[in-house]
Image (cartoon, grey):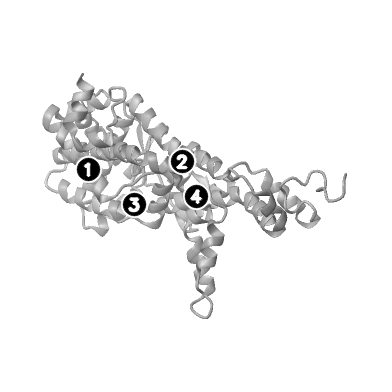
């Protein structure tokens, strides 16, 4: 070995010559792109706030199953599809978090891989600044654990307020439909809504979402668009350093609090920077997501008016206000997955669905969405007649 060469086996390991940290570095190096053990542990802690959770009352399970059977007939009637519905499965928050982590595992893995790419290094800079090189290697080793902690915490906190599995308009491969009665009932109490009617509304949303995503061509296209988006992130190793240098903590405020604020933004912590490819794709993904949300909202309103009556619109208004009053966790997952569920986007989708229904009816809307290549372009989303004309050619 020539003088100045690195010891054999050191590679990118910044601790290669420090036996004290050798085993620790090896452990970090064997995590894969995302540390799923960390993700599961942090999801469990966040979902239940560290407390134990009771199982769902069997009486609630029975009632939800009975309500679902009533709603299934109305959903089939309005969509014109003879959909086979999976079992409604009421779960505690912690179970929802673990099942959701598993359902989104391909997306989060794709995200971790895209963020794990190392940008081309400037050899001269690396030689001139060995400390920077060591910190870069440390960041690379820590990235899978940081990703696991961030993703797990995010999904766990989402579990504290989600109603079911289609609060986010992303296809899932679950063999059952998950709902979280504790969150549904708490929301009904907070908004002075009848609990039974609130449960009906959520079940209508879940069954309608399942119906839409049972259309294979639409499900595959939307899932592919989201995967394409999360796979196009480009890492920015300087993101944390840049934010640290911008903190003005000298002589004012609490430095510890400032650091907590910095690391409360997981996108910065992970160095997730929107790429030019994502910026170019965003309008197309926005149009697709808005159409899906608009379809579900429109059909849920139609079903709810049939089975709930006068309170249906009051419930819908409360739920949609909740949707646009997003939490930081909602914003983070939407940002990472390319979803923009703003009030403007939701209204665009609802107007699109309404415009199509005015022309071809509710079953006609579903039939058109079942055609290959059915997701609308941005121009078609704002002009439903163009979309209908394209698909009916």
Is mark 2 in CB contact (under 8 Å) with mark 1?
no
Mark 3 lies on residue: 183
Q: Viewer-nearest of labels 3 and 1?
A: 1
Q: Residue at x 74, y 45 (%)?
A: 11
Q: Secondary structure at mark 1?
A: helix
- The answer to which of 341 and 203 lies nearer the viewer is 341
Q: Secondary structure at mark 2?
A: helix
In this picture, residue 100 sits left or right of residue 127: left
Mark 4 lies on residue: 272
Is mark 3 in CB contact (under 8 Å) with mark 1?
no
Is mark 3 in CB contact (under 8 Å) with mark 4?
no
In this picture, residue 179 sits left or right of residue 354: right
| Marked residue nearer the N-terminal end (2 or 1) | 2
Q: Which of the labelled discs sits on residue 165, or is there none? A: none
Horizontal and vertical percent position of residue 264: 48, 60
| CA distance separating discs 2 and 1 | 24 Å
Mark 1 lies on residue: 348
Horizontal and vertical percent position of residue 181: 34, 48
- Residue 66 lies in what quarter of the image? top left
Is mark 1 in CB contact (under 8 Å) with mark 4?
no
Q: In the rendered view, tell whether residue 111 sits above or below residue 210.
A: below
Mark 2 lies on residue: 230
Q: Secondary structure at mark 3?
A: helix
């Amino acid at each position: 070995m020539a003088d100045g060469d690195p010891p054999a086996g050191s590679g990118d390991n910044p601790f290669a010559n420090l036996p004290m940290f050798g085993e620790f570095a090896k452990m970090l190096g064997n995590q894969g792109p995302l540390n799923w053990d960390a993700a599961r542990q942090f999801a469990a802690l966040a979902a239940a706030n560290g407390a134990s959770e009771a199982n769902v009352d069997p009486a609630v399970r029975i009632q939800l199953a009975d309500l679902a059977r009533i709603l299934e007939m109305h959903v089939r009637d309005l969509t014109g599809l003879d959909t086979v519905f999976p079992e409604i499965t009421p779960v505690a928050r912690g179970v929802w978090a673990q099942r959701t982590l598993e359902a989104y595992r391909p997306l989060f893995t794709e995200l971790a891989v895209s963020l794990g790419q190392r940008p081309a290094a400037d050899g001269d800079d690396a030689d001139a600044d060995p400390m920077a090189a060591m910190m870069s290697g440390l960041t690379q080793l820590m990235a899978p654990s940081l990703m696991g902690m961030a993703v797990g915490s995010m999904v766990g906190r989402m579990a504290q307020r989600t109603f079911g599995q289609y609060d986010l308009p992303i296809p899932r491969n679950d063999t059952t439909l998950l709902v979280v009665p504790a969150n549904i009932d708490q929301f009904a109490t907070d908004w002075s809504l009848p609990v039974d009617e609130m449960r009906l509304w959520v079940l209508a949303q879940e069954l309608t979402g399942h119906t839409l995503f049972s259309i294979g061509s639409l499900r595959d296209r939307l899932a592919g668009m989201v995967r394409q988006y999360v796979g196009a992130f480009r890492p920015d190793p300087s993101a944390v350093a840049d934010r640290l240098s911008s903190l003005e903590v000298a002589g004012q405020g609490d430095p510890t609090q400032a650091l907590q604020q910095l690391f409360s933004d997981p996108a910065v912590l992970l160095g997730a920077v929107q790429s030019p490819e994502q910026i170019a794709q965003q309008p197309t993904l926005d149009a697709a997501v808005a159409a899906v949300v608009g379809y579900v909202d429109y059909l849920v309103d139609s079903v709810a008016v049939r089975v709930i009556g006068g309170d249906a619109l009051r419930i819908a208004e409360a739920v949609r206000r909740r949707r646009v009053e997003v939490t930081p966790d909602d914003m983070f997952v939407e940002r990472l997955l390319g979803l923009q569920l703003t009030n403007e986007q939701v209204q665009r989708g609802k107007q699109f669905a309404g415009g199509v229904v005015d022309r071809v009816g509710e079953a006609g809307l579903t039939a058109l969405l079942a055609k290959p290549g059915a997701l609308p372009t941005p121009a078609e989303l704002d002009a439903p007649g163009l979309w209908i004309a394209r698909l009916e050619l």
